[in-house]
Amino acid sequence: MWRSMWSPAPSLLSLTAGEVHVWRHRLEQPPELQEIFLRTLAEEERTRASRFHFDKHRRHFVAGRGFLRALLARYLDTTPEEVQFAYGPYGKPVLDGEHRESSLRFNASHSGDWALYAFVQDHEVGVDVEYIKADFETEGIAERFFSALEVQTLYALADEEKPAAFFRCWTRKEAYIKAIGSGLSHPLDSFDVTFAPGEPAALSRAEGWSLFDLEVAPEYAAALAIEGSGHTVHLYELRSA
């Protein structure tokens, strides 16, 4: 399995052709940083934050968007407040406003206590992270969404292996459909991913893409999908903006 080694954030940030940068951070952040992030959000984002019923979910949304804006600002040499978003027909965010023509592509995901961001130049990218729920109804969901080969692989595993394997499969598939921007409108059973224990991440029936596992934290599964091949992936730990 491709192993994830997370490094401290570099002081000078440069993203060249052929590189992919992936960042991870914890969503629970100090109140003073939450206040800073809240001031950088667009009005629409602040409205969305205010609609969360649980304060924890509001805090995580603000931190997730705040860190995303802070990172994009560094790549684009601007301020977090100046970053503008547009959204594809299935919700994939892209840069808008004065950075609409930028070659920078990005994607984000969060689950439980963690968030992930991926950045690359001139190639589509998708990332997904999921908390592994040991009591999740894996087989019923797999039969609805996974390919016949994937269902067969899942059923062949020991019961104790199935939850982690299911979420490995789900994150690999989700990273790919997020990268192509189709969301769940793209049938999940129209392509296959590897996910048995010890099996390296790979796609079939989806040519021209690279797939990687990311080791974010215990009890989490995560994956990265990148258009093309031969990219160098750099993994960074983000603790503050």
Image (tube, helix red, strand yellow):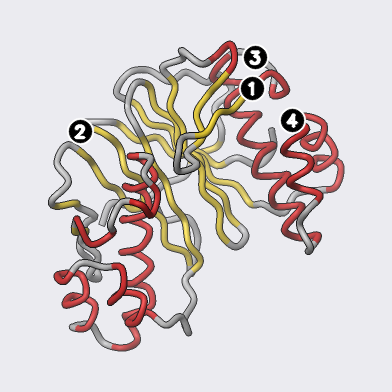
Proximity of marks 3 and 1: CB atoms separated by less than 8 Å? yes
**Residue at 18% over, 75% down:** 153
Q: Secondary structure at mark 1?
A: loop
Q: Earlier in the sequence, mark 4 or mark 3?
A: 4
**Residue at 44% over, 52% down:** 128
Which amino acid type is marked by label 2? Ser
Report the residue marked by disc 3. Answer: 78
Report the residue marked by disc 1. Answer: 83
Give above or below for 141 relative to 126.
below
Q: Earlier in the sequence, mark 4 or mark 2?
A: 4
Pair 2/1: label in front: 1
Give above or below for 146 relative to 118.
below
Mark 2 and mark 1: span between their CA atoms? Answer: 29 Å
Q: Secondary structure at mark 4?
A: loop
Q: Earlier in the sequence, mark 3 or mark 1?
A: 3
Q: Nearer the viewer, residue 155 or 88?
A: 88
Which amino acid type is marked by label 4? Ala
Mark 4 and mark 3: span between their CA atoms? Answer: 15 Å
Q: Which mark is residue 42?
A: 4
Pair 4/2: label in front: 4
Measured as percent of width and height from the top left, residue 60 is found at 70, 52
Report the residue marked by disc 2. Answer: 229
